[in-house]
Amino acid sequence: MPLKTQALLEALEAELGPGAVLTGEAVSQRAQGIWRPAPLEALAIVRPKDTREVSFVLRACHEAGQSVIPQGGLTGLVHGADTGPEDLILSLERMNAIEEIDQAGRTVRVQAGVPLQTLQEAVAEQGLSFPLDLGARGSCFLGGNLSTNAGGNRVLRYGMARENTLGVEAVLADGTVIDSLYGMVKNNAGFDLKQLFIGSEGTLGIITRAVLRLREAPGSRLSMLLALPDFPSVTGLLRHLDRGLGGQLSAFEVMWPEFYEAVATAPRSPAPPLPLGSPFYVLAEMLGSDPARDEAWVEAVLAEALEAGLVSDAVLASTGARNEALWALRDSVDVLAAGKPTQVFDVSLPIGAMGAYVEAVKAGVAAVDPEARVFTFGHLGDGNLHFVITPRPRSSEAVKAIEAAVYDPLKALRGSVSAEHGIGLEKKPWLGHSRSPAEVKLMQTLREALDPRGILNPGKVC
Ligand SMILES: Cc1cc2nc3c(=O)[nH]c(=O)nc-3n(C[C@H](O)[C@H](O)[C@H](O)COP(=O)(O)OP(=O)(O)OC[C@H]3O[C@@H](n4cnc5c(N)ncnc54)[C@H](O)[C@@H]3O)c2cc1C
């Protein structure tokens, strides 16, 4: 290790204390991610305890020209937190305090290393709810959620991470602390600086703390698994439920039949809750306030949908365990891989164009590999589709050809190559499909202005 680097690590250890700087086996015995068991590679993992220490680390790395990769729960799906042997990992894992829940203002101030599920459970004990929710809730950190502007299951009603964040504290590459930790919904005093850090995947600064917006905890939760005859019924049902449930529709997830069959049968599920063979399945959710009244309400709205032919079969869940069982189907994405490598996609496009787009993608993938299986599902209410395509081809040309089959048709639709997962390294070659040269140049200009030595997450995003 060069003397300069050795001196940097010693200076960090001296300032942050014993156990804060991990090297050697303490790094390599960790995995690259929750689905990536290969050993982590890095110069060191540095684990500050507070914002002052983050600022110290960045100032020192800025002076030394040392690359810094922020890491949260490592559940990201676009290789945004990947490292090489020369990189220094800045892990937020020890900044995991829920600092204050403000009951009157319905806000919470958290440190960036709090796992999403920990926060959800803590605020639920006080009759409140943090509505951001995703399958990785047990492992992802709020700092990671904000820096990827995570979406998830309830965007339809509550918005993405951005819409649920009132204030952010971030540290710039040179160690400057930007305290934008405000707790108001309305704040037009100049630029909304927190938005620089939300969704920029650790390239413009390290998010250290945030003030998040809370809602009243729902008094009832009803999940509906529905079978549908065709794609026009899917879009028709979305409007029918949204109108019929008076704004209380909180999720609208669609599953194409190959996806439903894989998650609703053995080994994942003993028996499908609805018979196989329908062209589409929807998992929808209403969050309300009165269990008895809301169940009758949902039943009436569903009866109309059945009568109108939008829905051919339905299962309704109103208890905790039955709700969880239906949502476990949607969260069973891991079962699709069946032990084989996969390619995972996350795109957005106008809802009305989705039926034809999915058929175009399937045809494009079949032209590359007739044996490939395409599992399609997504947060349709938000215009967001996911594909899991398996097996992942061995040759990099074929991997690229499958990516082209998914991304090329989006150009004409003005869709996005990333709905909610971000760009990271994986989608960087495709950024130009969804952003103009002038937009990419502006992103690079912002990076250069905030991080002139290019130490933050180099090579990622743009
Ligand atoms: C089973 C499963 C389901 C998922 N479902 C969804 C879903 O429905 N919706 C969705 O949006 N995503 C989903 N994801 C993707 C992932 O969970 C999110 O992107 C999540 O927000 C990443 O958080 P993390 O803490 O794991 O971040 P990491 O993976 O550690 O990092 C992600 C990116 O953020 C940067 N970063 C991390 N912490 C900070 C920080 N404090 N400051 C600045 N930059 C930082 C990293 O450098 C990296 O670029 C899913 C993933 C899995 C495995």
Image: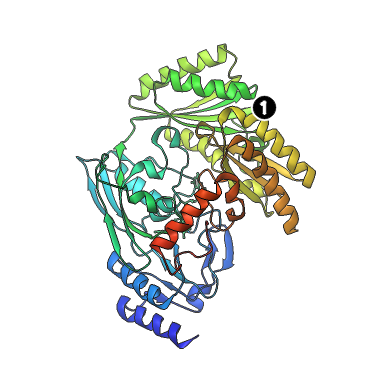
Residue in the foreground of this view, choosing between 358 and 452: 452
Some atom of ligand 1 lies within 8 Å of the CB belonging to the residue at label 1: no
Compared to residue 170, the image places residue 419 above or below, namely: above
Relative image position of residue 380 (x, y in whole percent):
54, 33
Q: Amino acid at mark 1?
A: Pro
**What residue is drawn where x is 58% and y is 18%?**
310
How far across and how far down the image is residue 217, in percent? 32, 35
- Residue 150 position, x and y percent, is 45, 47
Can you say whether 186 is above or below 43 in the image?
above
Which image quadrant is residue 226 in? top right
The one nearer the camera, 422 or 226, is 422
> What colour scheme governs how the chains and residues are painted in the rendered image of this protein?
rainbow
Q: Residues within 10 Å of mark 1 (few under 14, many from 20)?
A: some
Residue 246 picture location, percent across and down: 39, 20
Viewer-proximal residue, 388 or 205?
A: 205
State whether residue 265 appears in this view: no
Question: In terms of depth relative to the viewer, which is nearer, 325 or 43?
Answer: 43
203 up-or-down from 257: above or below? below
The answer to whether residue 195 shows anywhere in this view is yes
Q: Tell me what residue is drawn at x 74 percent, y 43 percent.
A: 365
Q: Which residue is mark 1?
A: 279
| Left/right of residue 224 with respect to residue 207 in the rendered view | right
Residue lying at the far front of the rendered structure? 438
